[in-house]
Image: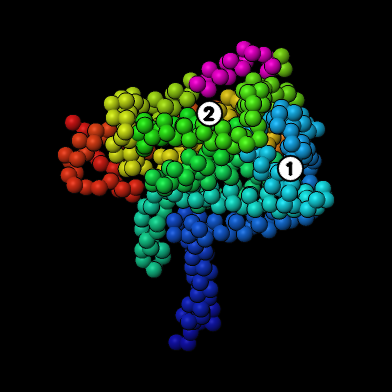
Amino acid sequence: MPPSPLARPANEADSSAAPKSRSSNLLEQGWQLLTELLFDRRYFWHLTSLLLLGELVLGLLIIKYVPYTKIDWEAYMQHVECFLKGESDYSRLQGETGPAVYPALFLYVYTALYKLLPADPDARVRAAQYVFLGMYLATFALVAGIYHAAGSTKVTTSKVGAAGERRVSTSTYPQALLIPLCLSKRLHSIYMLRLFNDPVAMLLLYAGVFAITHRTSMGWTVGIALYSLALGVKMNILLFLPGLLVLLVQYRGLVKTIGAVSTMAVVQILLPAAFFLGSASDAQAYFSTAFDFSRQFMYKWTVNWRFVPEDVFLSKSFAGWLLWHQLLFLVGFALFKWSPVPGGTPSVILNAISKPTRAAIAQAYSLPRHHIAPVLFSSNLIGIAFARSLHYQFHSWYFHQIPFLLYSGGAWGNFPLGMALWLGIEYAWATYPSTNLSSGILSVAHAVILLGLLLSPASGTKLSTSGQEHAASNAGSRITGTAQMDSRKVR
């Protein structure tokens, strides 16, 4: 019987299905490659390099096509000119926006820019923009290094079509978290268009954090030195200090903590000594100007408290309320979050006092690799959330830390909430001038993140605080930065 003219030959049907199959495989492979690029730890630096390249191109375009905004740069140069003329009274280093209210290293950095860049003011600004683009890229690279150092590797398997199983190395802090760091209009402006001194301080700070996350003796030494230099540029670096002190006691012990604090103090004395500490009056003028804790901010520039009436904003009672709540949250984090060991912070304090030359946590180097950065970043966020006022350039104080904190529990384990919080913060900082709505959103976002961090479960298995117990259960074993935490019960 002859075949029906309506029937399709088998080979024709197979050939029509083949393109669909190939298309499906291509989509599946493309999705797999994208997933690996975003989450597979093996490709962490691949994505980072792509983002850095994109930021380089974008930064060059911004410098070329977006006009520079005159705010503080001219005042910085005027401070430098007063300094170069031999003025030794720091309070008399005047610019069009007032006196120099930052520590001495700020002045030295901008003096170097004044000397090394072209003398023509316009050419100097353009050259400085390229310098700040370099700082922007260096900061991004250091932050990526911090995220990478905090991430521990977890190998999983996944099925990939007919190809069978594929082993994927994921990280507790995947490189996908770096993508939001490229999306802030405000941050690009702070660096490339306004040339504020905040990026200089944050570059040194992140370099210090990066050194500390390696958890070696040299890393701590270098990290403390860089932290001290960052503090020598701008006083906001003090917001990291409570968390840093906790980490020092945990990892280095009470004696070395005192030594580190002494180093910080000595650096702050040595930096201005050659020029501004020639007499008691000069020294008083320097420290009262560079570290002015009583400084009053103008209501019209506030980003975070616009919804508060101006008379309340300017009142001492409001300043006291903010300070007490900052201290309350610091104590809460110190007691319940920053010491993931049995007995918490009280047991750490007792260990530090009874054995001051030893690390307060006997197995501190077996704490999760992501222990250090969240302690420092949450300490900073607490200070920012209860700051008397935030100005637009202060966005750089914590912008790079937000995805990390959201992923660490600040988003309450909820991706849509995390996206909403990030977008809300960016909306608040992008709104000029600030409004009741924008400042309210910013303050609420800060509160939600802080509560999420405080109430989220502690990461990893809790450690024993007794070195003897650990030795009894693991005789002869050596604790390294990548060792598994001891899961045996504490007697």
Q: Is residue 321 magenta?
A: yes
Disc 1 is placed on an element classified as loop
Residue 401 visible in this rendered orientation of the protein? no
Badge number at residue 164: none
Q: Is 490 situated left or right of 78 in this image?
A: left
Badge 1 is on which residue? 194
| 427 lies above or below 39 | above
Confirm or deny contact between disc 2 and disc 1 (CB under 8 A): no
User: How many residues crowd mark 1 within 10 Å: few (<14), some (14–19), many (20+)?
Assistant: many
Badge 2 is on which residue? 382
Q: Is 283 situated left or right of 116 in this image?
A: left
261 vs 237, nearest the viewer? 261
Secondary structure of the magenta portion, mostly?
A: helix
Q: Is residue 103 magenta?
A: no
| 375 lies above or below 41 | above
185 vs 114, nearest the viewer? 114
